[in-house]
Amino acid sequence: MSREAYQMPNPSQANPGAGGSGSSSMGPGAQRSPFDADTNTVMQYICGDCGAKCPLRRNELIRCRECGCRVLYKERTKRMVQFEAR
């Protein structure tokens, strides 16, 4: 396909489940993106200085509550992760 023949998709065509009416309310059958995080979701981080566990919500200040350090590491997942080596 040539560059001149390419047409940008409309938002209503790209996401047929969105409704296309312009409403931003999420109906019972609407699909949610994995990036639409709830504001109540709490993620656990580990302080890089003192090692304390720091629960953080979205848009919260990134700082350890114990020592004030701004270096936080995300906790490792509990799920088993397996890779196929060749």
Image (spheres, rainbow, N blue to C red):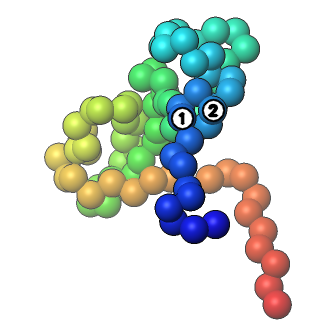
Give me the residue at 61% from left, 22% from top.
18
Asked if residue 51 lies left or right of residue 67, the reply is right
Instruction: Find the residue positioned furthest to the front.
Output: 4
Q: Whole-percent x and y of residue 32?
A: 62, 27
* Label pair 2/1, CB-CB below 8 angstroms: yes
Give me the residue at 21% from left, 53% from top.
70
Compared with 39, 46 (above or below) is below
What is the quadrant of the N terminus in the image?
Answer: bottom right
What residue is disc 1 on? 10
How far apart marks 2 and 1 lie (CA) works out to 5 Å
The residue closer to the viewer here, 9 or 61, is 9
Asked if residue 59 lies left or right of residue 29, the reply is left
The residue closer to the viewer here, 3 or 14, is 3
What residue is disc 2 on? 13
Q: Secondary structure at mark 2?
A: helix
Q: Whole-percent x and y of residue 30?
A: 67, 18
Asked if residue 63 lies left or right of residue 40, the reply is left
Q: Whole-percent x and y of residue 46?
A: 40, 52
Q: Amino acid at mark 2?
A: Gln
The image quadrant that residue 83 belongs to is bottom right
Compared with 6, 25 (above or below) is above
Asked if residue 24 lies left or right of residue 77, the reply is left
Give me the residue at 55% from left, 56% from top.
6
Instruction: Find the residue positioned furthest to the left.
Output: 68
Disc sitting over residue 83 in the figure: none
Compared with 16, 20 (above or below) is above
